[in-house]
Image: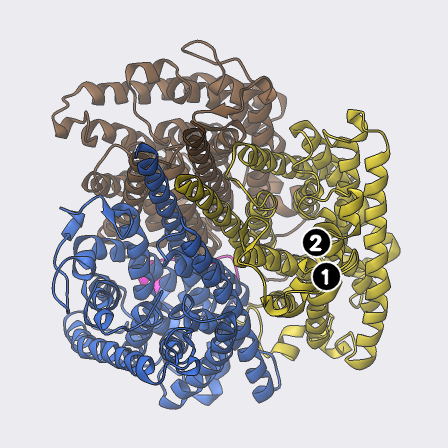
Chain colours: A yellow, B blue, C brown
């Protein structure tokens, strides 16, 4: 008896250790997003982007700690939870691991959903407005979706599959990104054909570093979502997840590079980097449910989806400064639907028929509807109270000097 | 019997694996410090700062391996240890984990204490002098303090609480930073009001990357200090530690940003970044002893402490180029005292009275006294033998070209 | 019975978790290599170097998944394996861990061998040619060597010791680097004494970041190669490995810095950074077989070997843009031979005589012969089909604008 108890305890410890390490990695994604978004925007506003990254993380932690966690995982109804505000009155164990570790993993996810918006609205959005929006995302907007899918809500009940968050995290961030970018409006001159070149990202090395950091951290994001490793079954699942993540990332990059190479004659860096991220986002929903072959197909198409979504935004004249919607929104939606096609258990191509695909589509649409229904009035109100955009002068001379009192690179001539 | 033995062995392995992973993260802090310190100083001396970082790590490893470990953890008296030089004649197990893993974790801590000084004295200090100082710190100055608190010395005996090193690591580094900066003197023109702007850090993106890396690595620093995870109690402790670390970091950044915003009208990047670090340093002593609420309060005040300590240095005309003393010294002292206030078991606000607070104060003062007593004569002697400062010409044209034969950014116009 | 089974299962999970975490770290080496190689080359070709890094990883994953893994670890003869293409028909467990985790660790190694070449041939090599070469390396060239040593092949049978790949990974990459660099020819003006200065690396901070990332990730590379941690013996081995890795890295940097300081009067950054990497590469073969003293001696001499190999390349007028051969080839060969000297069990200095040293020498020569025998015809054929070099115009104006349609730093004057 005593031995059995201790074995259980040791498995509990190993599972918790695993999730903690993965949570640390998910926090490190913030470094990746920071470098990616700063690298893909202009030098005169780099500080502004980075401060937004740092603050959506900081306020995101607070918003999720006091409110979001309870809305997402607290006992409640099919729509929303309402227990565990400030983590009070929770049992020491949640989902088979220590509650503190579970919270840490989840708060890192919430901060990821929030930070996706930063890049889309970069270089012209008011800092205070952005902070308030971030807080609302982690305190309420994201947790409700999370409750539907991971908190025992209605999408979980009907069998919607989103293992690590192509929809819950990435499409939520992506929809918020495109709506916010449309509301804020494009950067001055962004769609003037003569000035297009001047909107190139100011540091491809930083952006590339960001992608490498994100690839690395994504192992925590996806593998940690198993929430366990201390059994042969969990071990096999986690290994498959990590392998699928790798294959999709590689093929997302390859397919995006190939298509941009074929269509422009040059293997361009920006679209390729976003293709890698698209592969990662795409496989996030199904990494535990599809075979390596499925993961590779998802990666390939995710890279293509990112490419065409980028063109679409250009046509719509929505200025998403870093491609946040193509990467997180479009590839997130695609990846979620792809589960309905490629899931070894229940997917269309494995004899499951249209049933899972239909559920996936319903989930995708419901989440999009929720985000639109909330984001539009929220942005409208934020515009009234705080305003969305900095002044024309600030934007032209760069947000850094005007708004943060410092240049990102004071020693260099630009 | 055999089963029980194997269970114990497996727990030993899990504990060691945990500490090793955390040790790897603590080593990665060197990347964070390097980017932070280079980013916060001028482009013409970036190589010089980075070479100091790399070499205080390298010589720090050697100094701690041959001498420091034995002084810190070897059997000895209440003041100093003296056993295990070069790790010889040690048992295979220390503190419940493999001795090699314990050493690795500890040597990474020693290197952290040493590297804090690099930023404070950047852009004007002689390289050889700095290396000798680093070696002395890890070989003797730091290990003696470590012995007092973590090696079974007199501060441990009276109940001084410094879980992961707000005092042992950070205040030691911070005191050494301020004393060294005062001895070396300010950079030329640093306190000339007209030239102030020209001392801005040359790359806020690198500095921000540094902070994100440090936040990530700090999970290893604090959570690893439990030295165990293979039981329900350790698992709960480690989870609380990681959660407290997160909350304090977030609130350190928020409070520092708020105060600088209120006082200057702008949410400035440098003070905010240092506020995050202040929150991390502040919670390091008490992360295992305080509640999440306590951690949040510590984070808030740590951010404020960093802000005012920065102003104080400015008034004292001590040129601490990156704010090493405000972050590591001031927030380290504050965090150590805060344990006496917020410790759930023994803190003033939890009915413990002034007893623990008094012990904490004694520890803080004793450590400061030790550092002053050693650093002043050491710096005096180093000045006599090697000199502390580079020539006026080297400093004006930048240490990189003159002293390291290379520019950090040869392709860019400055 | 049931308890014993579960204990075994838990050990299996812990071992797999350990290898997965280490595999994640090895993937992160790609970030390190990317920053190192971009930092050590010129700004006008930074995008080109980074795209090569990203794509050798991506195509490397695919090549190893479909072909390389089967050639390396599949059942076969003493020369090559031939089972498990696309990971099909493999048992769920390999080498005591989940097969997926084993694959992940190994594919990260394969990608490391491939990416070493990118830096050597930077700034003048055709992108498509480079991608094809990368694919061939991970699909066939590297896996054959891997089979000899780690897949049960003939070098394993005669007792060749290369614990984590000084020869299998690093010397393979190093030989490929020097051969490719010789075939492609030097960058225009590279050996014109008047222009030497203009070939300095464009960002020492990025290169330094790369080295810190590599040092951190190397803990995964070396410690993970034990493939286990769930026993007292494995725990001790892993701890020794991590400690030896640290000591060799520190002393590699110190010795390289010392020799460049003595010979040029300045502690130069580039050679010092490569010295750290040389120490890491050098200790990789023997990290589990030598004592800490042995690791320190290996580190010292590896730093010296890197220094002199760099001079040799200069004399031979082979333009290895980042020092890939000195670091990975020369230090890799040295480190492999050093096992024959310093292995506690079988080394010359521990009474083992010349027997192990002879085996090590044979292995080093055989691997070099294999690489030369393949790389020369492969490069010859690639030259015929695709061409090796970009046009003179592209090279002079920089590969980024011409070949990738973007500048790495469009906002800065150069």
Question: Residue at 81% across / 36% down in the picture?
Answer: A356
Asked if residue B197 is positioned above or below residue A112 in the image, the reply reads below
Most extreme residue toward the front is A1
- Density class for disc 2 (Cα within 10 Å; few <14, some 14-19, many ≥20) is many
**Of residues B348 and C279, the one drawn nearer to the viewer in this rendering:** B348
Pick whichever, C382 or A253, lies toward us: A253
Residue B208 appears at what percent x and percent y?
53, 65
Q: Most prominent secondary structure in the magenta stretch?
A: loop
Task: Determine whether, in the image, residue B364 is placed left or right of residue A283.
Answer: left
Q: Where on the picture, by quarter, is residue C19?
A: top left
> What segment is highlighted magenta in the picture?
B400-414
Mark 2, secondary structure of its residue: loop
Q: Position of residue A370 (x, y in %)?
A: 83, 59
Residue B217 in view (yes/no): no
Q: Secondary structure at mark 1?
A: loop
Residue that label 1 marks: A81
Disc 1 crowd rating (10 Å Cα; few below 14, some 14-19, many 20+) is: many
- If the image is split into quadrants, where does the C terminus of chain A sit? bottom right
Earlier sequence position, callout 1 versus callout 2: 1
- Residue C99 vertical position relative to residue C42 in the rendered view, above or below: above
- Between residue A32 and residue B352, name the one nearer to us: B352
Q: Is residue A23 left or right of residue A331?
A: left
Q: Is residue A392 left or right of residue C85?
A: right
Q: Residue at x 24, y 62 (%)?
A: B138
Disc 2 target residue? A151
B83 falls in the magenta region: no
- Above or below B86: residue B138: below
Which subunit holds the residue at mark 2?
Answer: A
| Dot 1 and dot 2 within a common chain | yes
């Amino acid at each position: 008896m005593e031995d059995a108890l201790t074995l259980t305890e040791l498995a509990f410890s190993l599972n918790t250790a695993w999730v903690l390490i993965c949570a640390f990695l998910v926090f490190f994604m913030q470094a990746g997003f920071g470098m990616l978004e700063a690298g893909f925007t202009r030098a005169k506003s780099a500080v502004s982007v980075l401060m937004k990254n740092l603050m959506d993380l900081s306020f995101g932690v607070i918003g999720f700690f006091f409110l979001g966690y309870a809305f997402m995982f607290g006992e409640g109804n099919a729509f929303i939870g309402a227990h565990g505000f400030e983590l009070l009155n929770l049992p020491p164990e949640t989902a088979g691991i220590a509650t503190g570790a579970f919270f840490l993993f989840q708060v890192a996810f919430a901060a990821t959903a929030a930070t996706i918006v930063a890049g889309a609205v970069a270089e012209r959005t008011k800092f205070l407005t952005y902070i308030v929006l971030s807080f609302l995302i982690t305190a309420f907007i994201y947790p409700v979706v999370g409750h539907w899918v991971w908190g025992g809500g209605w999408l979980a009940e009907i069998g919607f599959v989103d293992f690590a968050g192509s929809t819950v995290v990435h499409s939520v961030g992506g929809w918020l990104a495109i709506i916010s970018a449309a509301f804020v409006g494009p950067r001055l001159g962004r769609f003037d054909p003569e000035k297009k070149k001047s909107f190139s990202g100011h540091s491809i090395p930083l952006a590339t570093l960001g992608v490498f950091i994100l690839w690395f951290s994504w192992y925590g994001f996806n593998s940690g979502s198993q929430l366990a490793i201390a059994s042969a079954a969990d071990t096999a699942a986690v290994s498959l997840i990590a392998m699928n993540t790798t294959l999709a990332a590689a093929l997302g990059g390859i397919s995006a590079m190939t298509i941009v190479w074929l269509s422009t004659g040059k293997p361009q860096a920006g679209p390729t980097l976003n293709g890698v991220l698209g592969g990662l986002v795409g496989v996030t929903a199904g990494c535990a449910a599809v075979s390596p072959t499925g993961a590779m197909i998802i990666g390939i198409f995710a890279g293509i989806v990112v490419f065409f979504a980028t063109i679409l935004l250009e046509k719509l004249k929505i200025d998403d400064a870093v491609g946040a919607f193509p990467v997180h929104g479009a590839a997130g939606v695609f990846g979620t639907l792809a589960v309905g096609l490629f899931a070894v258990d229940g997917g269309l191509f494995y004899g499951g028929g249209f049933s899972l695909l239909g559920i996936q589509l319903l989930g995708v649409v419901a989440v999009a509807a929720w985000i639109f229904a909330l984001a539009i009035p929220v942005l409208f109100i934020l515009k009234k109270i705080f305003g969305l955009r900095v002044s024309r002068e600030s934007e032209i001379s760069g947000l850094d000097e005007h708004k943060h009192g410092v240049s990102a690179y004071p020693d260099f001539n630009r």
